[in-house]
Amino acid sequence: MTTRTPAQDLEESAERAKSLAEGQDLSLRASQLHRMQSAAQSSLLPFPLFRN
């Protein structure tokens, strides 16, 4: 059994934090892209949508 040094633990923790941050960034970008696509789609709809 190998013993881990505090430096190894710290490095592993930093890697996990980095990958989590990258995942959150991708998620944010995806939601922004989805919002932009929804806005573009809604501008293509006939206006006004409902008539009285």
Image (spheres, rainbow, N blue to C red):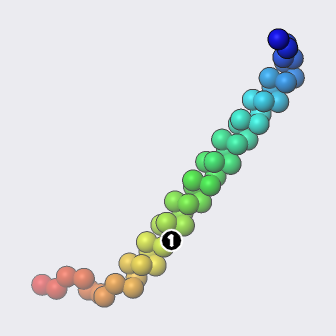
**Displayed quadrant of residue 45:** bottom left
Residue designated by label 1: 36
- Answer above or below: position of 13 versus 26: above
Q: Tally the numbered discs.
A: 1
Q: Residue furthest front?
A: 1
- Answer above or below: position of 23 versus 35: above
**Residue type (three-letter) at the residue carrying disc 1:** Met
- Answer above or below: position of 19 versus 25: above
Q: Residue furthest left?
A: 52
Say left or right for 12 vs 27: right
- Answer above or below: position of 40 versus 11: below
Which quadrant, please, contains the N terminus?
top right
| Callout 1 crowding tier (Cα within 10 Å): few <14, some 14–19, many ≥20 | few
Which quadrant, please, contains the C terminus?
bottom left
- The residue that appears at 48% across and 66% down in the rendered structure is 35
Say left or right for 31 vs 3: left
Q: Position of residue 13 (x, y in %)?
A: 75, 29
- The residue that appears at 61% across and 48% down in the rendered structure is 24
Q: Position of residue 23 (x, y in %)?
A: 63, 48
Q: Position of residue 30 (x, y in %)?
A: 56, 60
Say left or right for 2 vs 32: right
Q: Secondary structure at mark 1?
A: helix
**Displayed quadrant of residue 33:** bottom right
Q: Position of residue 26 (x, y in %)?
A: 62, 55
- The residue that appears at 73% across and 41% down in the rendered structure is 18
